[in-house]
Each structure stands twice: as structure tokens, then as C-alpha cells.
Amino acid sequence: MVHALERVTSQLAPGGVIICIQPHRMKRPFISVIAQRRRMPIGFLINPVFQPLINSAEAAIAKALDRKLVTLIGKENHRFRVQLANPNQLYRYLHTGQRPPRFAPGDKKRFLQVWSAMPKGATIEVSEFLTVIALRNEGGGKGM
Amino acid sequence: MLRYAFCNGAISISSVSTATELPSDYPPPGMELRLIRRFVDPKGRRVLEIGCGDGRLTREYARLTKNVLAIEPDPASISEVRRAFAAEGITNVSFRVGSAQRVRFGGGAFDIALFSWSL
């Protein structure tokens, strides 16, 4: 990631902008069950494989900033929510990526208990958290 | 179906699926472009996208830009997205198979570089 960022910066025009959209550093997907306008929180999912990748990406950005290859324009956290019809759909949703997250110990059992007690029409909500980091190349890249 | 709301200055978006369709685990269509535009307008710019995958995001902004160089390590994805873009008449996007560390970027300088979910 460090080399990728360095190489990309070298290809930017002076004043060019790098935008990184990536998972939030700390907030993993959060599962809730929604029924009759009530949200029942279950818990954050865990994904131990993913955390080192996020750390590595953020370290690469910090290094590029330290070396003054780029300056930070802004960093924002956002979220989006996905509503799913049933646990089978949740399972398929979680396994669309190469590194699927999983429930924390005890949460899956609790989720299934909560779900089985829900009336018809209940949905499962996944809140996903992301970070946008914008950097500017202050020079040293390619000329216009 | 998408629902949009602003919470504490941040964009919060909900996508609601039916029982049969499986929603993507990427942000809903349009969200990433709106987030990019909070910092830079891609209109008329030369864009380098690292890790374009199936062209999901590229498709959203390509027509606004002057041109795009999209890089992806998976040859099958590139092959498929090339065909799809040709069929859709998106002609200002070039694709390269490879990683940001190794691929040849060509001679031009870019105004915007995007790393979208390409850790």
C-alpha cells in the first residue's frame, strides 16, 4: 500500500487529489433486527483478517503525510444501512466478499433467538461504516 | 430502493432489499460519487482508479470525466468490464491488468486518483 500510494502520487498533476474510500478503522458492520418500527441491536460483527489491512492502509497514508508527499484535505466517516429479509439472506450477504465477517461469540445464537420471536415482516439491518480520506499532491508529481 | 438521510453532517443511506434479491455489500449506487464530490469534482478531469473490480464505481463517474485509467489485478474482471463498457458506449475508459505498484500508467498526469475499497 505504501508503494502503491507513492507510485500513484508520482503520477498526479500538482494539486491532484487522492480519494481513499475504505472500511471504518474501528466500526465493523452492526446487526440489528427491526420489527414494528423497533430496532433490536444484536452486535458488531468481527473480522480479524480485515483489521491488519485497514491498519496497513492507514499507516501508508500516515507515512505519505509525514514525508509531505501529500497533505490531508479531509477525513469523513459515513455509514449506510442494508435491510435484509431473513437470516438466509444475511448469510449470503456476509459471504459476498472474500473475507466474510462473523458474529462475535454468543451473538449468533442471540440473533437467531430474537429473529425466531419476531412477527412476520421483520427485517435484518446491517449498518456498514466507511471512511473517506482525501489527500492533495502538493507538488513533485507529474507536470500538467 | 434507497433511502437517504443526513445525520450529524454525514450521509446515511439505507438500501432495502426484497426477499429474493441480494443487495451488494458496497455502498448504494450514487453514494460514493457524492462522497468524492465533497472533495473534488470529477467533471472534465483525468482519473486514475486503482482496483476498479467489475467497474461498479467507474460506471457512475466515467461519463463525467475527460478520461479514466482503471487498474485491476483480476484479468477476468477487466475482460468482462471492457465488454460491458463497450456495449454501454462508455469509450473514455482504458483498462490495465495489474497492481498499482507494477502497472505502467502511461505518459499522462492525472487530476484524481481513486482507491475505492482497494486496500
Image (cartoon, coloured by chain):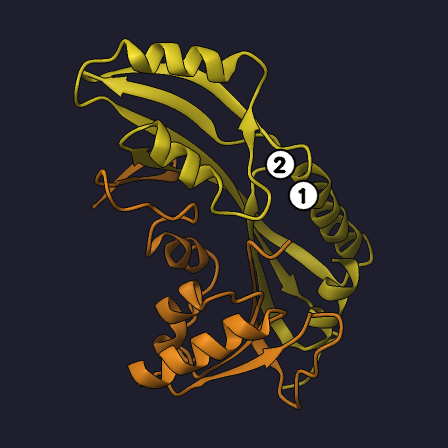
Chain colours: A yellow, B orange
A22 sits left or right of A43 in the view: right
> Residue lying furthest right in this view?
A67
A52 sits left or right of A135 in the view: right
In 3D space, how far apart are the residues under numbered discs 2 and 1 (Cα atoms)? 6 Å
Instruction: Give percent across and percent down for residue B29.
Output: 33, 55
Q: Which mark is residue A29?
A: none
Circle 2 chain: A
Q: Residue at the spot x=78%, y=58% of the render? A: A2
B89 sits left or right of A14 in the view: left
Q: Residue at the spot x=59%, y=69% of the render? A: B74
* Residue B8 seen: no
Residue that mark 2 sits on:
A25
Q: Are marks 2 and 1 in contact (CB under 8 Å)?
A: yes
Of residues A51 and A119, which is closer to you in this image? A119
Instruction: Give percent across and percent down for residue A109.
Output: 47, 13
Q: Residue at the spot x=47%, y=38% of the render? A: A94
Label 2 vs 1, first from the N-terminus = 2
Q: Amino acid at mark 1?
A: Ile
Give the structural element (helix, strand or loop) at label 1: helix
Q: Which mark is residue A54?
A: 1
Q: Amino acid at mark 2?
A: Arg
